[in-house]
Structures are given as C-alpha cells and as structure tokens.
Image: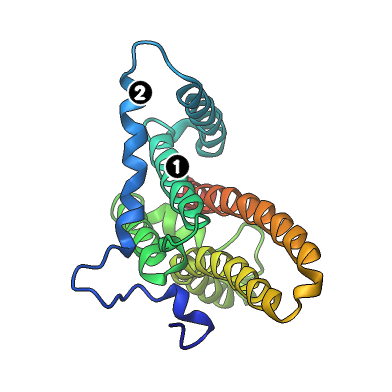
Amino acid sequence: MMTNLFSAFDPATSIKMSMNWFSSFLGFIIIPLSFWFLPNRVNVMINNIIYKLHLEFKLLLGESSKGMTLMGITLFMFILMNNMMGLLPYIFTSSSHLTFTITLALPLWLSIMLFGWINHTKHMLAHLVPVGTPNLLMPFMVLIETISNFIRPGSLAVRLTANMIAGHLLMSLLGNSSIQYSGYIYLIIIIQMLLMMFEMAVAVIQAYVFSVLSTLYTSEV
C-alpha cells in the first residue's frame, strides 16, 4: 500500500530478495540479436541508431574520438533501455533513483578529471580561465569554473532522476483522479495516452542529453 506519492520510487520490497533492480538487466535479451545470420528489423533499427550516434559523438570529440564514441553509445543505450522499461506497468524505474544515476555520473566524471589532471595538467589549469578574461576577474573565474566542474556529476544525476520522477508522478496523479472524476474518464484516458507519448520522448531525450554531456566533458580533456 502506498504511504505517500513517492512510494512508487522506493526500491525496498517486503520479500527477502528484491527484484526491483532486475529490470536493469532485461536489456541483455537483445544482445543475441546481433549474432543472427540474417538481421531482423529490431537489429537493423538498433544498428542504425548506433551508427547515427557514432557520427554524432565523433563530431563532438573531434580527433580524440578513437574508441571514445563507444562510451557514449553504451551510456545512451543503457539509459534508454532503463527509461523505457520504467514505462511498463509494475516495473520499477531504476533510472528514477539517485543511486542509479549517481553511479553512472560520478565514476565517469572522476575518471575524466583524474586523466586530465594527471596527463594534461597545464591544459586543465588553462581551462579554468576563459580566453579574454580581464585580470581583475581571473580569481573569480577560477572559483566559478572549479565549482561548475564539481557540480557536473550532481547535475547529470539529478537531471535524469528529476525528469523521470516528474512524468511518473504526473501519471500517478491523473490515475488517482480518474476514480474521483469518473464522468470524465474518456478525457483522462486521452490525457494519459498523450502523457505516455510525452514520457517516451522524455526517455529518449534524457538518455541522449546524459550521453552527449558526458561526451562533451570528455572532449574538454
């Protein structure tokens, strides 16, 4: 029984073995599709998405894109799979939990920062002061750039979590109001269908934004 509106995002269960996070591994069922002798339509669609993403990330990374596009493509597909799984009934949305998103964002940002400061120290120091900054504003710009670098993993994690929670909460509120306003049930169903289409678009956009921003942070190093 739901104690409050946010109970749907609680990963704890009453049974001993929690199966809420199991939806994160359901995407592995599409991996054998790549080993088919003749590719089916799902495999062709996935390959087209991967190719388009490869071109997009290669353009963002520039000359330093050797193998790094694979990171962005993997992030996009993994987050998209979890976002789409969360739209199905009775499946826990793992991407709406902060532990899931911060686990993706923090190690990625930390590895990029460590690689940059160890191998390109001068470039990282020069990046703290934008070109054309007046001498009087240089200390403030260093402080602002340092703070902006430190909040990047938090902004990545909170952005994905907040967007996934917002849509699910709105659908929950409409579902609860359908009991009280049964006379407008057809209107509520139409609104729910439109909101479901909007949530599917948000799932794709948030996966794309997360992977693109991670790629941009990598290209700065």
| 62 left or right of 20 in image | right
Residue 59 picture quarter? top right
| 178 left or right of 24 in image | right
- Depth order, front residue of 50/203: 203
Residue type of the residue flagged with mark 1? Met
Q: In the image, residue 214 lies at what x, y percent?
A: 47, 51
Q: In the image, residue 32 lies at what x, y percent?
A: 30, 27
Point out the residue furthest to the top here: 37
- Crowd band around label 1 with a 10 angstrom C-alpha radius: few (<14), some (14–19), many (20+): some
Can you tell which mark lies on residue 34? 2
Question: Regarding mark 2 in the picture, which secondary structure is present there?
Answer: helix
Mark 1 or 2, nearer chain start: 2
Q: Residue at x 30, y 56 (%)?
A: 22
Residue 38 picture quarter? top left
Q: Which residue is mark 1?
A: 77
Between label 1 and label 2, give the one nearer the viewer: 2
Q: Quadrant of the N terminus?
A: bottom left
139 versus 61 height, above or below: below
Residue type of the residue flagged with mark 2? Ser
Q: CA distance from mark 1 to mark 2?
A: 14 Å
Can you tell which mark lies on residue 147? none
